[in-house]
Amino acid sequence: MGHNLSLKRLAVPIFFEVFLHYASLMINTYMVARHSNFLVGSMGAGNQIFDLFITLFSFLSIGCSIIIAQAIGAKDRILANKALHQSLGLNLLIGLICGVGIYLFEDSLLRMLKTSEELFLQASLYLKMLAICLILESIGIILASILRVYNLAYFVMMASFLMNIIMIISNYFVLYHTNLELLGVGISTIFSRIFLIILLLFVLIFYLKIKISIKEAFCFQKEVLKKILHIGSFSAGENLLWIVQYTIAFSFVNQLGAIQTSVQTLYFQISLVIMLIGQSISMANEIIIGKLVGARYFHIAYKHTWFALYLSIIASFIVALLNFLAKDFSMEKLELLDSIKEVMLPLFTLSIILETGRTFNIVMVNALRASGDAKFPFLSGCVFMFGVSLPVGYVLCFYFHLGIVGIWIGFCADEWLRGLVNAYRWKSKKWQNKSLV
């Protein structure tokens, strides 16, 4: 398979592509933080609900990419084409349902998160705009996954870069030349997503020469969907558990006041950047493992994952350490109030432990998924997220009065324990009989 299995050739563009994708919300957060520190809290509630619902349909992109990767490894082009079309069709339907649901019931969702009255109006306007973005994301996520598997991550990276340029320009206009505030930021986000989808479709149709058939996208076949959903449902379940865990933890933070809510919102964006190193390597490894498993090269897949794990842990540790050393610079650039800086400061230290553990876990989870063994990481997620992370975080937060620090200690315990359990599963080689092609 040659250069198609190069970790570097896949991981580098995936890193920048995922970074640029996350940067869309980070740009919004940064520009709004410069405009108003406390308005960021309104964005936090909307972003959290957006992340929760986007996970509900992101499972098809995971299932789609793994099935296509295994099909490419097994040289089954018909299955790859069917998986591509049916993932696009079903994801669009789910995106429409979720987007309309959020738009109609945004007040109830915000109240479930205990959003304070002072933040409620802006949070509501912003969330309605994100609901429309969900429909666009349902298409964009699948398109990006397809192009990555076909080794075109560089094209996705460049499209994401252009999208963010448009977003920066439009955000600056609405924040400093209109009174729209978060409503304008939401409209800017929608416009940039439309631009991204147009570019991705152009690459798919004119570069890969894949003809998109609307009839085939919505003419669902049981056997193909069964393969996609077998991987995707458990993969999404594990991701959904993580988002639900974080959402519950976010509601804990909301009870601590507007300052802690703003800290959680801001630092979570920083945490996403640190996480990108491990995430990009694990996504690249996932594509490679899928192709190797499809071609029945199990021994190579086994060794390749351990190499990817060691590399990603070292890289994540270095990035987390640099983030710690640059903590004063980061907070100054965000122009934070002293009260917010005081609460945020301990999280820079905790990140060194959390992000290395999170990378450990992510690499092992993605490798198991790529082999077809998606059920195990889902079950381990159920046990540790709700049996360790939330109880530990709640007790340390409210009974030991550690506040947001206690909640993040709970995150650390969960990620490290799950990483060790999932690594043991990979070492057992029980995943070798889970291939879907």
Image (spheres, rainbow, N blue to C red):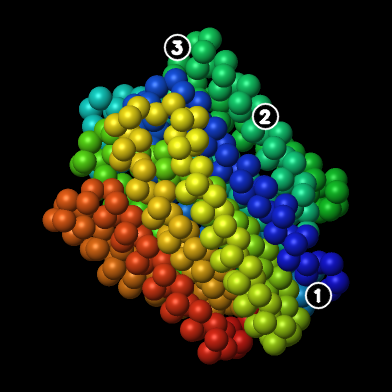
Counting residues from the N terminus, which is met first, the one under dot 1 or under dot 3?
A: 1
Say if mark 1 contacts mark 2, CB within 8 Å: no
Rendered view: 335 above or below 423: above
The number of numbered badges drawn on the structure is: 3
Left or right side of 322 for 336: left
Amino acid type of the residue tagged 2 in the rendering: Ile
Residue at image location 35% in from the left, 67% down from the top? 413
**Which mark is drawn over residue 179?**
3
Q: Which amino acid is tagged 3?
A: Asn
Mark in the foreground, 2 or 3: 2
Q: Label 1, on which residue? A: 75
**Label annotation for residue 398:** none
Q: CA distance from mark 1 to mark 2?
A: 38 Å
Residue 251 shows up from this direction: no
Q: Position of residue 232 (x, y in %)?
A: 53, 66
Q: CA distance from mark 1 to mark 3?
A: 55 Å
Number of other residues with Cα within 10 Å of mark 2, as a class: few under 14, some 14 to 19, many 20 or more:
few
Q: Is residue 307 above or below residue 432?
A: above
Across and down, in percent, residue 141 comes to 61, 50
Tell me the mark number nearer the camera, choosing from 1 and 3. Answer: 3
Say which residue appears at 56% left-offset and 43% top-offset: 22
- State the separation of the CA atoms marked 2 and 3: 22 Å
Seen from the viewer's position, the closer of residues 279 and 163 is 279
Question: Considering depth in this image, is 397 or 226 the residue closer to the camera?
Answer: 397
Does dot 1 land on a helix, a strand or a loop? loop
- Tell me the amino acid under the disc marked 1: Lys
Residue 39 visible in the snapshot: yes
**Which residue occupies the extreme left position in the image?**
399
N-terminal of the pair, mark 1 or mark 2, is 1
Q: Which residue is mark 2?
A: 165
